[in-house]
Structures are given as C-alpha cells and as structure tokens.
Image: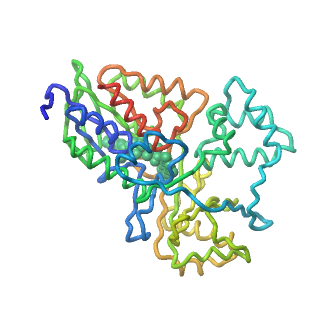
Amino acid sequence: MIRSQAEHIVVIGAGAAGLMAARELARAGKRVTILEARDRCGGRIHPLSPSEFGYRADGGAEFVHGEAPVTRALLREAGLSLLPLRGARWNVDQRGFSQDETRASHTERLHEVLAALEADLTVADFLKQYFAGPEYGELRHSVQRMVEGYDAADPARASVLALRDEWMNSGRSMQARIVGGYGALIDFLTAECRKHCAAIHLGAAVGAIETAEGRALLRCGNGETYTADTVVITVPLPLLREIALPAEAHNRVAAAADIGFGNVIKLLLRFKSCWWVDAKGNDLSDLLFLLSDKTIPVWWTQRPAEHAVLTGWIAGPKTHALANFDESELIEKGLASLADIFGLSPQRLMQDIVAARAINWANDPFARGAYSYATPDTRAAQSTLASRQGAILFSGEAVYRGPDMGTVEAALASGLEAARTIL
Ligand SMILES: Cc1cc2nc3c(=O)[nH]c(=O)nc-3n(C[C@H](O)[C@H](O)[C@H](O)COP(=O)(O)OP(=O)(O)OC[C@H]3O[C@@H](n4cnc5c(N)ncnc54)[C@H](O)[C@@H]3O)c2cc1C
C-alpha cells in the first residue's frame, strides 16, 4: 500500500479507544503511531494470567452491557462469541440469604417522578427534593447503592437524567461475557493494527505536546520525541491534566472537570472448590450475584462457567476508606467480608485460596480510577472536549456522548468517531 508520508497521526493510549481509532486510520492508509505508557495494550481492559485463575480472568472490564453495537460488530469480525450470564441474584442481610426479587417499595412512585422530570439535578438533590421522608429510607438506600455500585458515581455529583433510562430498565443490564475475555478483543485489535502497519510503542508515556505551524511535537518520559500532523489523545480523564498541552487544548481540558470519574476496587479470589454453594443451609449452586452490606459488598461467580472463582467489587466514594490498603490487606478485607456473610472463619477460607488479586484502580498510575459518569454539566463538557480544533483531538470512554458512558462500548464508539472525523 502506498502511504502518504505527509500525514502522520499519533494516537496516545493503546486501550479500546486508541486501538479502534488506530485500526480504522491505518486501514484507510494513514501512517499511524500508537504511544502507550504501559508495557501492554488494553488499558482498563486487563486480562490476568490463565495460570493464576484457570482462565483469562478480567482485572478490569468484564461484562458486555446492553446492545453494544460496535462491540458486537467487532466480535463478529474477530470470530469471538458471547456467553450470556446465567444464574440467580441473591441478597444477604441480618435476616439471612434471600432471592427476593420484589422491588424496593415506592419504586413506582420513583418512576413516575423520574418520567415527569424536565430539568436535570444531582441524584442527591433529587432524593432530597422528592423522597426526603422517613418512609423513603429503603428507596434512598437502594438508589444510592445502585449509583455507587454500578456507576461508580458520587450521588452528590451524578446526573439524575443521565441515569433515568438505566433505572427505568432496572439498572445497567449485565448480559454477557466474551468467551476468552475482553483480552481476546484487544488481541484482535492489536493484530489488526499491526497488520495495517500501525507502529505500537510500549513504555512511551507522553508528557508534553507542543504545536507549531499546524504540526505537533510530542515528548515522552523515556526521552523520545515524535512529530505528527494530528494527535488523538485517549488517556483516562484524570491523566489529561498530567500532559502539558498547548493553550487551546489545555483550555478544552478544563471542561473535563464537569465529567465525573469514579473508582472501583476489584478482587479476584480463586479457591480449591466452590464452597459457597452450601450457605448456612441455603442451596446457592445457582449463585451469580450476591449483594451484601459488608466492606466488600458485591460478589459474583463466573456462571455459567464453573470456575471456583469469586469476584468482589466495591465502587464509588466508599472506596476512599480503603485507599491506603495494599493488595494483601484488600484481600484480607475481602476474605473477612465473605467469612462474615457465610459464617465461616477467614482462616478456613484462606486455606482454600489458590490465587488472589486485588486491584485498586485509583492507584493505577495510568488510570487513576475506573470510569466516567455524567454530572448535570457533562454533555456540554463533552462537546467542548470533542470539538476538533487544530491538531489535537480527544477520544476515549469519557468523551462518548451516547447512553453507555463508562463502558468498553463507549471507548470503541469514541475511537471510531475520532477516526471518522479525521478521515
Ligand atoms: C474495574 C473495572 C471494571 C470495568 N468493568 C466494565 C465492564 O464490565 N464492562 C464495560 O463495558 N466496561 C467496564 N469498565 C470500563 C472500561 O474498562 C473502560 O470504559 C474502557 O476500557 C476505557 O477504554 P479507553 O480506551 O477509553 O481508556 P483506557 O483503556 O484507559 O486506555 C487509555 C490508555 O492510555 C494509556 N495512557 C495513560 N496515560 C498515558 C500517557 N501519558 N502516554 C501514553 N499512554 C498513556 C493508558 O495506559 C491506557 O492504556 C471497567 C473498568 C474498570 C477499571
């Protein structure tokens, strides 16, 4: 293929957005270079070694939510398949285990008020304004748990209108996993980039970008420099502030303060057996999700796959209380939560452990958190960030203006949009 040496595009970040943008640009014949700070591709898609967990467990993104048209089209192209989730959702509280699917009381009233809402406000203000009474205590608790747990969001900042659709459809549906994990999708995209001659440089953290006469000069922490006609920046939102940018791009980045960005701590515990199936006399052999009020409140299994792995999850502002715990202390917290839930001793669970990981994404130097969420001012901020001015474009899950912010689908769709803007 004859490549135009006149146009060189540098993509910063080899996550889902960066790889997608690079693949589209490279296969359209552009000269593309990807600069990635880590020693691997994938970013917040982080497959763990099969030798640890018995399969390619996901330390970051794991589920394909909802319709996800860009993801599904890519999976078809890659010859990858989806395995729908199967199993039951259990709750546990001081009364014990229950599979009670009945919705919190006043849910209908919540839907009525939401449907009639015209002006946006934060979730916390919404609850204060419409559901302040003591009779709504359970409803407030369940809304806050959903906002923090699924969206990793702070109710004091999260937009109620942005979450309305999610709630009306009873939460962000977690429908399926990719057979081979999200890592298989990243492998496919990486191979596609290479096939179309995009260069991928790992260990290349961009620290500064200067522009002159319509061209950009990029400086990396490892001392290397690159020039480009166009730069696509796909780094996570908190990392945008760490790159020295020309004044115009710097001003656009200021808008990012109006986009929420939450944290997640994810634990993966592999045991010798699926000991949880017999829980205080309850048959939990169908367990998919388990919701509790313990320190690590949410747990899930790999059903329908039979791996003896439990994944623990804590998200949103509650993760701040665990900020100073190292990996082994987080694993201890996880085991203590499980021991409490199942009435077992943590030592007995520890004896059964085959492999364990705990990832606090806020402490990851190239993520500084998990994913974005909408505040009442986010749509305007995204338009400012996504507007193309000069040589620099912003892309990534946080810039995506569709309904599934904070997902892999959002990142892929945003990467595609950036490539199409350039082409
Ligand atoms: C724990 C967790 C669970 C999740 N679960 C799900 C899920 O189940 N389903 C779902 O759809 N989504 C989920 N997500 C969200 C999903 O992972 C992200 O929305 C998506 O992967 C973001 O892709 P991206 O390309 O926008 O950003 P990233 O994947 O973060 O890619 C950006 C890249 O930029 C690199 N970078 C950073 N700074 C620099 C620099 N200065 N120079 C060069 N490179 C740099 C980073 O290393 C990274 O590789 C989850 C995220 C986390 C953390």
Left or right: 202, with 161 as reference point: left
The quadrant of the image that shows the C terminus is: top left
Q: Say whether residue 404 is left or right of residue 56.
A: right
Q: Residue furthest top?
A: 213
Which of the two residues, 83 or 318, is positioned nearer the viewer here?
83
Q: Could you tell whether 148 is left or right of 43 in the image?
A: right
Q: Quadrant of residue 258?
A: top right
Tell me how many marks there are.
Answer: 0
Residue 276 in percent (x, y) is at 63, 74
Residue 9 picture quarter = top left
Could you tell me which residue is drawn at 49 percent across and 42 percent down? 68
- Note whether residue 362 is visible: no
**Residue 66 in sight from this viewpoint:** yes
For image coordinates 23% across by 21% down, the residue present is 212
Q: As rendered, which of 22 and 209 lies closer to the eye?
A: 22
Question: What is the x, y in percent for residue 358?
Answer: 49, 62
Residue 366 position in % (x across, y down) = 39, 47
Task: Quarter of the image for the N terminus: give it.
Answer: top left
Q: Position of residue 303 (x, y in %)?
A: 55, 64
Reply above or below: 264 against 70: below
Work out whether residue 336 or residue 172 is closer to the camera in this orientation and state it: 172
Identified at 32% across, 50% down, the residue is: 188
Left or right side of 317 for 326: left
Q: Is residue 363 above or below residue 197?
A: below
Is 81 rendered above or below residue 210? below
Say how the picture is coloured.
rainbow
